[in-house]
Structure formats: C-alpha cells, structure tokens
Image: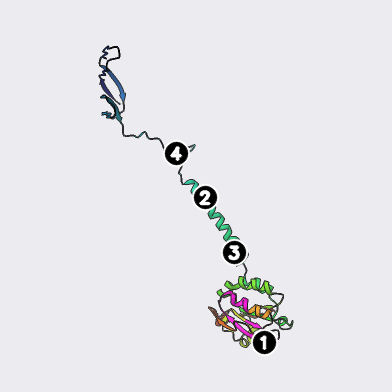
Amino acid sequence: MAAARLVFSLSLPSSTHGINRKFQPFLLTQTVAPSRVRCQSTPESSEPQEKLVVDNGSTSETSSPATKETSSGFPESPNRDVNRRVAVASVVAALALFLSTRLDFGISLKDLTASALPYEEALSNGKPTVVEFYADWCEVCRELAPDVYKIEQQYKDKVNFVMLNVDNTKWEQELDEFGVEGIPHFAFLDRQGNEEGNVVGRLPRQYLVENVNALAAGKQSIPHARAVGQYSSAEARKVHQVTDPLSHG
C-alpha cells in the first residue's frame, strides 16, 4: 500500500458578523490503495468548490435486484426458475404422450386377433362381415390396428370382424378367392357372405367407417367398393408361411 499525502487549503467567506476566518493548511496523511486522485469542479455551485474524486477502478453502483445471492455466496442465475418450469412442462408432455400411446396406439394386431370372430362362424350367423387379411410383419397393418379396433368396438354388435393371417397356409383358398395381392386387405361381405367390395392398404379412416356403416345399415352397396392405398405385398408371405390349421388367425 502507498501513502498518499494530500494538502488542503480551505477558505470560508466572512460571517454575518464581518469576522474573517482563515484556516491554516493542514496535512492529511492516509494509507490507501493505489488509485487515481483528481479534483473535479462542481459547476452548479455559485462559489468555487472542489470535490475529491477517488477512482480505484471499481464501481459503486447498487446491485441489480435480479441478481441475488444464494446461501453459498454465489449469485443465483435469473434463468433458474425458467429452467425449472421448462423441466416440469417436459415431464408433463412426456407423461401425456405415454398415456396417449398406451390408450390408443398401444392396440396391436394380437389384440385384434384375440377379439376377432372365427371365419366359419362369421359366415353362418347371418350378420355382414369385414374380413381383414394381415401379417404380423406388415407395417401398414400395425399402423391401422388402432383405427380398426375403434371401428370394431363401435359396430361389433351388428357386424362380424374376422382376422386372417396370410402367413397361415390354412387360408390359401381364401387368398385366391378374394384376390389378395397386398395387405392389409379388407373384404366387405353382406349377410349371405357375398363380397360387396374391398379396400387395400393405408387409406383415410373414413373409408372403413363408411363401408362398415353401410353394412350395418343393410344397404345394397358400400360407398368405397374398390380403393387402394399404400400396402405391403402379399408375396412376402412366402418366406413367413406357417401351418396352423387350428388357428383362425
């Protein structure tokens, strides 16, 4: 630390009693940190005054209220509260996505097969029938499973729903009879088992809804008797074939 030696000479104006007062120069010695000392005149005053300004490179501004210290002595980031909110929102969104997946897209082809009616029974109970030809490896079949399940639950009291696995050699005759070349292949049968039309591949859900609704209402024809979307080739079944004569799937 260096010693700064400052000499001040102060002269005051005469008092109201006309007495002149002079103060002798005095010596101020103080140990301070190395800094710059300069005199700055204050223009606002009517009399010349001098103001001692010490500049040691630091600022004396009051800290912004946005930066508050934590118990550890470190300033707390103003973004911490925002980060917490973002984290909570992310958890809620992930939970919502999980629930929607479980409640809707969690429906699988096995679920459809389990609730499907055996083909022979469907042809003999006097109800119209929807026959879906599918395969476990068919991506489009898996994608449409939730929509098919919803439609089945809505019309199951009026319409039969049958699932036939193209990998099962038991259904070779039906594959030829309905001309199945791509899957999923939906065949719509009237109450006597006669085919009124078919829909193949990925198409808007409304196609299936309107056709099934026409069957349930006993109409003479269905609105979409022949429609083809993106599908998986049934030829791929040759490398997946299994023999399961006891299975209706």
Dot 2 amino acid type: Arg
Cα gap from disc 2 to disc 1, whole angstroms: 60 Å
Cα gap from disc 3 to disc 4, whole angstroms: 45 Å
Q: Is residue 202 magenta?
A: yes
**Height in image: 182 above or below 146?**
below
- Residue mark closest to the camera, 4 vs 2: 4
Per the image, label 3 sits on a secondary structure element best described as: helix
According to the picture, the residue beneath numbered tag 1 turns out to be 194
Measured as percent of width and height from the top left, residue 23 is found at 27, 14
According to the picture, the residue beneath numbered tag 3 turns out to be 101
Dot 4 amino acid type: Pro
Measured as percent of width and height from the top left, residue 11 is found at 26, 18
Cα gap from disc 4 to disc 2, whole angstroms: 21 Å
Query: CB under 8 Å between callouts 4 and 1?
Result: no
Per the image, label 1 sits on a secondary structure element best described as: loop
Q: Is residue 101 at all visible to an observer of this figure?
A: yes
Who comes first in sequence, dot 3 or dot 4? Answer: 4
Per the image, label 4 sits on a secondary structure element best described as: loop
Quarter containing the N terminus: top left
Quadrant hosting residue 247:
bottom right
Q: Is residue 148 magenta?
A: no
Q: Which residues are magenta?
A: 187-210
Cα gap from disc 3 to disc 1, whole angstroms: 37 Å
Left or right of 4 on screen, residue 112: right
According to the picture, the residue beneath numbered tag 4 turns out to be 65
Q: Which mark is residue 85?
A: 2
Dot 1 amino acid type: Asn
Who comes first in sequence, dot 4 or dot 2? Answer: 4
Per the image, label 2 sits on a secondary structure element best described as: helix
